[in-house]
């Protein structure tokens, strides 16, 4: 296409970056850009109902595609409406590019004018102004380079008068941003210390985060675990990594599996690979053994637990070196943590309302192994995060990075566009859905194969439990919502109301029949309380502990 204006140049840059989808809400500031993008026929525009939803969708697309997720909103209130989703994406270090026009330069009386730079920077996202027509390629390339380097969201802030300005005649074609360089090789002296610590250990455990990518790279971790005779645990972000390995104990921490946390507590040496080992993963910290921490980011060391051996280097390269060194030393007998006994009894077939664990168990049995999962935040979510299984962290996401509810529907819509033709299952609470209800229209408009499971306890569950723990009335946490299944049908989405345990039997049949969206409104027991989530809530209320959200 012939580039005449900055709008043309930004459009060409998006095409050159391989952008396939843009999640948008059109307004005066971005209508020229979105129209030009549409006219190319090269990029699909997905129109959200709210700017928060648009950015959440870009977040979901980035998480499930492994590519930048692009969103665009208008200036002023269009940008301010993105706050929670942008903060969530920042906390998740998600590769989101937000194109946010600004009011015209020098128009101090524009009704939508506000300090967009301060607003964006307050979220922790990168702010890059589109300075002048002759810097459009440098400015656009900077935001894509930022997200491709794994530094989290970046915002291209473009005053509309700059967007509509003509390009200088000598403007050269845009060149896509380069990818990140390979991580550093580990320091030999640090590797020697790590080998010595692992060789001396009698109860080693490996804790793996998202710094180790799934696939062939992760296989070396399994080989290392076999050499050490070490159990494998993961952070919640890495849920599903090496899940089929016989030494895998699953996710550690309160929102994971009990055996993984007990293994970390009993270990005399923990090898941390590409994880922050924050208090949520480690149940308050790794205090009982030697810590060998491997991460490409030196700032990750000692952030939460002091490492006896810090290896700054690419986690995959380091694992390969450790594997080769320990292979020469010969395999170890290792240890196996005691198995956990399951004393949970099933509920009666006519139980109503439905115990939340029964919902998760039935859904887990009904879904295929190659499931795509998104789980929202809230008390109900603790059950899903603990026992709803995943075999691949690239196919699983939780959305409580910023502690906000109501993000999962948007993220799941982005996931559906990232994984075209595959069914996505989103588990969210009734309060979560009511915050994002408008995006059911987006689900219906695009006919997405989305399964929406609403864990409906008639209010805000964690607040109910917190009030009760304080001896306060729970009245203000309870809400008589409209018929959620009926609302979904009003949007044109098939919906089923489940009020008894026996009704869960419809899940496999309905999921086998539906090809488009479907919603299940499951009325769960509001008095059921997950002990792990109660512990997490108590930790959040503690003012003396400095904790950081789960990043990897």
Image (spheres, rainbow, N blue to C red):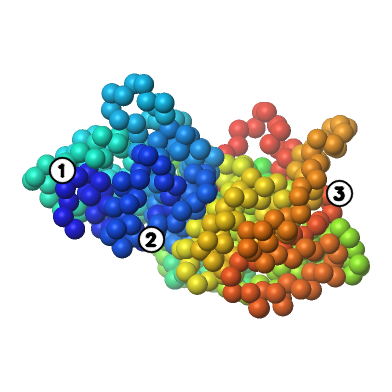
Taking depth in this image into account, of 549 and 225 the one nearest to the observer is 549
Question: As displayed, is residue 367 above or below residue 473?
Answer: below
**C-beta proximity under 8 Å, tags 1 and 2:** no
Query: Closer to us: mark 3 or mark 1?
Result: 1
Question: Of all residues shown, which one is farthest toward the top?
Answer: 108
Disc on the earlier residue, 3 or 1: 1
Q: Residues within 10 Å of mark 1 (few under 14, many from 20)?
A: many
Tell me which residue sits at (86%, 58%) in the image: 353
Question: As displayed, is residue 48 above or below residue 391?
Answer: above
Residue 5 visible: yes
Q: Quadrant of residue 473?
A: top right
Disc on the earlier residue, 2 or 3: 2
Q: Which residue in the structure is indicated by mark 1?
A: 167
Q: Quadrant of residue 548?
A: top right
Q: Residues within 10 Å of mark 2 (few under 14, many from 20)?
A: some
Tell me which residue sits at (29%, 52%) in the image: 36
Q: CA distance from mark 3 to mark 1?
A: 63 Å
Quadrant placement of the N terminus: bottom left
Q: Secondary structure at mark 1?
A: loop
Q: Which residue in the structure is indicated by mark 3?
A: 527
Q: Which residue in the structure is indicated by mark 2?
A: 44
Q: CA distance from mark 1 to mark 2?
A: 25 Å
Q: CA distance from mark 2 to mark 3?
A: 45 Å
Residue 236 visible: no
């Amino acid at each position: 296409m012939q580039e005449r204006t900055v709008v043309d140049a930004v459009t060409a840059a998006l095409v050159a970056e391989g952008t396939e989808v843009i999640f948008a809400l059109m307004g005066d500031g971005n209508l020229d850009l979105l129209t030009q993008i549409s006219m190319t026929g090269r990029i699909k525009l997905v129109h959200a109902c709210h700017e928060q939803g648009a950015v959440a969708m870009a977040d979901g697309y980035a998480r499930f595609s492994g590519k930048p997720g692009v969103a665009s909103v208008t200036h002023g209130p269009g940008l301010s409406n993105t706050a929670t989703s942008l903060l969530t994406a920042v906390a998740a270090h998600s590769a989101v590019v937000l194109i946010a026009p600004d009011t015209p330069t020098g128009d101090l009386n524009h009704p939508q004018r506000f300090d967009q730079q301060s607003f964006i920077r307050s979220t922790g996202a990168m702010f890059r102004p589109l300075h002048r027509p002759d810097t459009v390629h440098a400015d656009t390339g900077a935001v894509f380079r930022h997200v491709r380097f794994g530094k989290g969201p970046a915002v291209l802030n473009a005053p509309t008068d700059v967007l509509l300005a003509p390009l200088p005649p000598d403007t050269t074609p845009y060149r896509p941003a380069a990818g990140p360089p390979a991580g550093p090789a580990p320091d030999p002296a640090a590797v020697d210390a790590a080998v010595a610590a692992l060789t001396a250990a009698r109860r080693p455990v490996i804790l793996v985060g998202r710094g180790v990518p799934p696939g062939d790279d992760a296989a070396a971790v399994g080989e290392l675990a076999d050499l050490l005779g070490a159990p494998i645990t993961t952070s919640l972000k890495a849920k599903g990594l090496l899940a089929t390995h016989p030494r895998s104990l699953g996710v550690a921490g309160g929102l994971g599996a009990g055996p993984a946390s007990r293994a970390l507590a009993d270990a005399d040496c923990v090898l941390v690979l590409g994880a922050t080992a924050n208090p949520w993963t480690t149940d308050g910290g790794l205090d009982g053994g030697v810590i060998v921490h491997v991460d490409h980011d030196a700032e990750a060391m000692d952030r939460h637990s002091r490492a006896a051996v810090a290896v700054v280097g690419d986690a995959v390269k380091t694992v390969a070196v450790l594997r080769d060194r320990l292979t020469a030393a010969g395999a170890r007998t290792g240890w196996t943590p005691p198995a956990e006994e399951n004393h949970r009894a099933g509920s009666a077939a006519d139980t109503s309302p439905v115990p939340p664990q029964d919902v998760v168990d039935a859904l887990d049995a009904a879904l295929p192994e190659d499931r795509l999962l998104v789980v929202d935040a809230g008390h109900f979510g603790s059950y899903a995060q603990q026992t709803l299984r995943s075999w691949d962290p690239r196919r699983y996401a939780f959305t409580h990075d910023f502690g906000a509810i109501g993000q999962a529907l948007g993220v799941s819509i982005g996931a559906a566009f990232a994984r075209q033709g595959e069914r996505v299952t989103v588990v969210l609470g009734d309060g979560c859905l009511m915050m994002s209800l408008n995006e059911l229209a987006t689900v219906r408009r695009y006919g997405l194969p989305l399964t929406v499971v609403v864990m409906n306890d008639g209010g805000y569950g964690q607040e109910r439990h917190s009030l009760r723990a304080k001896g306060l009335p729970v009245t203000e946490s309870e809400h008589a919502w409209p018929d959620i299944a009926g609302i979904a049908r009003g949007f044109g989405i098939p919906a089923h109301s489940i009020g008894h345990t026996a009704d869960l039997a419809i899940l496999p049949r309905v999921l086998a029949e539906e090809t488009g969206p479907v919603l299940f409104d499951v009325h769960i027991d509001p008095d059921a309380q997950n002990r792990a989530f109660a512990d997490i809530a108590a930790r959040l209320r503690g003012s003396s502990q400095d904790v950081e959200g789960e990043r990897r």
